Image (cartoon, grey):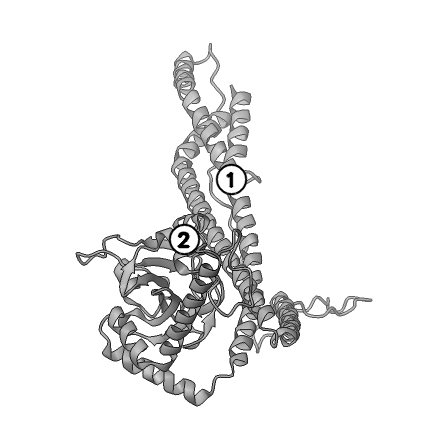
């Protein structure tokens, strides 16, 4: 009986506490770190006073060594960042006078930034799920600790106190037999508990490996995102500087836009007033009309057949007008930002009405790209919308984007589908859209309008992009 008890104690201890910890499930006390030397107390030397032939060793300060390693790592990172910046500047200098190449680089960089943001968001969600599973497994282990500790303690006591001799004290032996009978009834249940405990421990080890892997992946994705954002920022600056807009004229246009925004009470009224009074919006509308007339003339010359590409109509980065009519772009447009759809067109808005657009929760600082070719008609803050961007995409259609922190295009400017037009904030400045859904992160509002009325944008989105945002 004593040998079997001792073996079972060892078996249970190995399951409960791998690594030789105490059988009661308590963690061994960690050694207290030695106090760092103060200014008045010099660090202890390893030299032994009076020992013949001994040499004095330099004082050991692990904290200082760690800080030096961190500083060297930081310096290496800064050097690498500076090298990358110079490389980006040289690349942009070589293409800034080539509009088509600059546009292509912008669209490509925006696509990579959006993809990196999506990867980071997915990794964060997976990491959150894994951490939740780890916590649940920890709670399961904690709930079994007291039961297993009691059984282990009983077995240890049995090993220390051997059973009495049968002929010397029969009454004591009867007690021992009864205890053995009770123990036999307990052992199957205890085996089931220890098996479940072993499974939990194995799951915990697997979860910790997965968490470490996800954190490594997240760290790499963040580094890639930072590098792509640096490149995109420089490309945007090159694009805007190449436009050559006079600063005084631009400031006057921005002030006029702000005045109109304060006076208009609805988006319909805002669009109507800016086309009537705003020079930049008038230019955008005029260019849109010219493009529409040119398209109709081309169709008439082709016998009434619509002129659109069978593949992607947005492949030409040097175009100066929309590739196709907006009405013909259904099923082709990409979502303007990586994020999660919080509310869709037609959903209840919480005030007895329905949503006129999409509400997309994004990462802080996310890049916003224009989903379709068009001319910027309005770019300024507007009431509770936050920063508002209205783009004339031709044929009486407008694309409205709101809730951004910074807009990096100017009124009257022609922008290609996929080009970056704005960046989101950190969520601290609450727009009406963010307040409506109670979001802590930034929220982008997207609306399509036709002849002054909000329309359902669903037919225009590519299915793959809709699935990503809904996921």
Task: In this rendered view, identify the residue nearer to me: 254 or 365.
Answer: 254
CB of mark 1 within 8 Å of CB of mark 2?
A: no
Q: Earlier in the sequence, mark 1 or mark 2?
A: 1
Quadrant in which residue 375 is drawn: bottom left
Residue that sits furthest to the bottom in the current view: 248
* Quarter of the rendering containing residue 270: bottom left
Q: Quadrant of residue 223?
A: bottom right
Q: Secondary structure at mark 2?
A: loop
User: What separation in Å lies between label 1 and label 2 (alpha carbons)?
Assistant: 68 Å
- Determine whether 225 is above or below 182 in the image: below
Name the residue rendered at 26%, 53% in the picture: 346
Residue at the top extreme? 167
Residue under circle 2?
Answer: 330
Residue 47, image x and y in percent? 73, 68
Name the residue carrying label 1: 22
Q: Is residue 390 left or right of residue 204?
A: left
Q: In the rendering, at what x and y percent does residue 243 appear?
A: 51, 80
User: Which residue corresponds to the image point at 31% horizontal and 59% vertical from the top-left?
Assistant: 357
Q: Is residue 66 visible?
A: yes
Q: Nearer the viewer, mark 1 or mark 2?
A: 2
Whether residue 369 is visible to the viewer of this picture, yes or no, is no
């Amino acid at each position: 009986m004593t040998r079997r008890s001792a073996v079972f104690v060892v078996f249970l201890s190995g399951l409960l506490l791998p690594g030789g910890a105490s059988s009661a499930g308590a963690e061994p006390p960690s050694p207290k770190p030695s106090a760092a030397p103060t200014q008045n107390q010099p660090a202890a030397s390893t030299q032994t006073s009076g020992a013949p032939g001994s040499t004095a060793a330099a004082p050991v300060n692990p904290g200082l060594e760690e800080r030096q390693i961190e500083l060297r790592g930081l310096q290496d990172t800064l050097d690498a960042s500076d090298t990358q910046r110079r490389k980006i500047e040289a690349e942009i200098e070589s293409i800034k006078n080539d509009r088509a190449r600059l546009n292509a680089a912008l669209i490509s960089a925006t696509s990579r930034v959006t993809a990196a943001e999506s990867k980071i968001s997915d990794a964060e969600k997976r990491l959150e799920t894994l951490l939740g599973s780890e916590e649940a497994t920890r709670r399961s282990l904690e709930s079994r600790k007291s039961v297993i500790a009691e059984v282990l303690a009983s077995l240890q006591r049995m090993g220390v106190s051997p059973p009495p001799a049968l002929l010397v004290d029969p009454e004591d032996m009867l007690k021992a037999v009864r205890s053995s009978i009770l123990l036999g009834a307990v052992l199957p249940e205890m085996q089931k508990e220890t098996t479940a405990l072993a499974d939990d421990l194995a799951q915990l080890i697997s979860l910790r490996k997965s968490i470490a892997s996800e954190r490594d992946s997240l760290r790499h994705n963040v580094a890639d995102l930072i590098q792509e954002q640096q490149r995109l920022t420089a490309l945007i600056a090159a694009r805007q500087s190449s436009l050559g807009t006079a600063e005084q004229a631009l400031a006057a246009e921005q002030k006029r836009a702000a005045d109109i925004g304060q006076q208009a009470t609805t988006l319909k009224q805002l669009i109507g007033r800016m086309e009537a009074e705003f020079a930049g919006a008038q230019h955008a509308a005029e260019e849109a009309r010219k493009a529409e007339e040119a398209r109709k003339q081309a169709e008439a010359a082709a016998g009434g057949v619509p002129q659109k590409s069978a593949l992607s109509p947005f492949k030409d980065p040097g175009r100066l007008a929309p590739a196709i009519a907006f009405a013909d772009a259904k099923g082709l447009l990409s979502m303007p930002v990586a994020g999660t759809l919080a509310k869709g067109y037609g959903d209840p808005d919480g005030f007895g009405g329905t949503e006129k657009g999409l509400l997309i929760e994004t990462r802080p600082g996310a890049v916003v790209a224009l989903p379709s070719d068009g001319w910027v008609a309005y770019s300024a803050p507007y009431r509770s919308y936050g920063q508002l961007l209205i783009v004339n995409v031709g044929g009486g259609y407008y694309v409205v984007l709101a809730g951004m922190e910074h807009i990096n295009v100017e009124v009257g400017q022609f922008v290609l589908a996929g080009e970056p037009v704005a960046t989101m904030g950190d969520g601290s400045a609450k727009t009406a859209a963010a307040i409506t859904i109670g979001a802590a992160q930034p929220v982008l509002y997207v609306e399509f309008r036709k002849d002054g009325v909000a329309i359902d944008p669903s037919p225009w989105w590519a299915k793959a992009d809709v699935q990503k945002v809904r996921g």
